[in-house]
Amino acid sequence: MLLMTASQIRGLPVVTVDGGEDVAEVRDVIYSPEAGRLVGVTLNKRGFLGGRSRDVLPAEAIHAIGQDAVMVLDESNLVAPEDAPEDVGHPATERNVLEDDILTEGGASLGKVADLVLLVGSSGEVVGYQIDKAGGGRGYIPLPAQLSVSGVALVVPNITEEFVQDDLVGLGAAVDEFRTRLGLT
Amino acid sequence: MDAIGWLILVVIVLVVAAVAFVVIRRRRRGGGVIATKDKG
C-alpha cells in the first residue's frame, strides 16, 4: 500500500497487464467523499497532443495503482461512458474540489484544497486532503472530514481544526483518531 | 524591412506559437479531482 496524491495519479499511463501496452493516460480522478474511496478516472488519449478520451476507467476495473502506472488487466477494462457507473461515465466536472475553500461549520477558514490523498495499491481509499493553510504553508486534514462538498467549498466539522497535520506521516494516525472522535469506528 | 526587422518578426512569431502550443496542450490534457454527488 502506498500513499499518493491525486495529482500524482493524474497523468499516469494506463498499462495493460496482459500485453504491457500503454493504452491511455489518467485525466480526472473521481472520488466519493461519502464512501471515502476512488470511484474511477477519466482518460486522455496517448500521444503528445492527445486530448480527452471518450472511454473511462471505473475503479472496479483497475487492477492496481502504482507510483509509475495504473494497471488494468486488458484494454477491455476501458469502457464507454454509457457502460460505466453514472458518476464515472458522466462526471460532474463543476465539482472539482481543487482550490475549494475549506470552511468549518463555525465559519472559520482553514485554507484551500490543494490535493486529495489516497491509499493506493489494489484499492483506492481516500484518507484525506492536502491543503494550503489559511495561515500559509501546506497541511493535511483527514477524511471523513467534510460535512458537504461542492465545486466551491468544503464544509468540515469544527474539530477538524485540531486534526490539521503538517505531514503525511501524521495524517495516518490522525485519520483513526479523527474517526473515533466523530464516532465512526 | 531590413534583416533585423525580419529577424525580430520571426522571433515574435515563434514565441507566440510556442505559448499558444503550451496553452492548447494544457487545455487539452486538463484534469481535476471530482467529487461525486453523494454529499452536499
Image: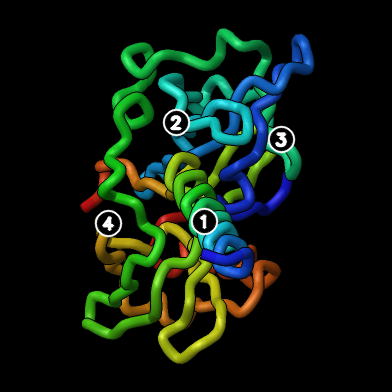
Q: Which residue is mark 3?
A: A69
User: Mark 2–mark 3 contact, CB under 8 Å?
Assistant: no
Q: Is residue A86 left or right of residue B32?
A: left
- Give the residue type that dot 2 points to: Arg
Q: Which residue is mark 1?
A: B13
- Give the residue type that dot 1 points to: Val
Q: Residues within 10 Å of mark 1 (few under 14, many from 20)?
A: few
Disc 4 and disc 2: Cα gap in Å? 21 Å
Q: Residues within 10 Å of mark 3 (few under 14, many from 20)?
A: some
| Disc 1: host chain | B
Element class at badge 1:
helix
In the picture, the disc for residue A151 is 4
- Give the residue type that dot 3 points to: Ala
| Disc 4: host chain | A
User: Mark 1–mark 3 contact, CB under 8 Å?
Assistant: no
Residue at the spot 47% in from the left edge and 52% down from the top edge:
B20
Rendered location of residue A19, percent (x, y): 77, 11
Q: Are marks 3 and 4 on the same chain?
A: yes
Element class at badge 4:
loop
Disc 1 and disc 2: Cα gap in Å? 28 Å
Which one is nearer the viewer's eye here, B12 or A27?
A: B12
Q: Are marks 1 and 3 on the same chain?
A: no
* Between discs 3 and 4, the one toward the N terminus: 3
In the picture, the disc for residue A52 is 2
Q: Is residue A172 above or below residue A84?
A: below
Q: Do we see residue A75 in this rendering?
A: yes
Q: Do we see residue A116 in this rendering?
A: no
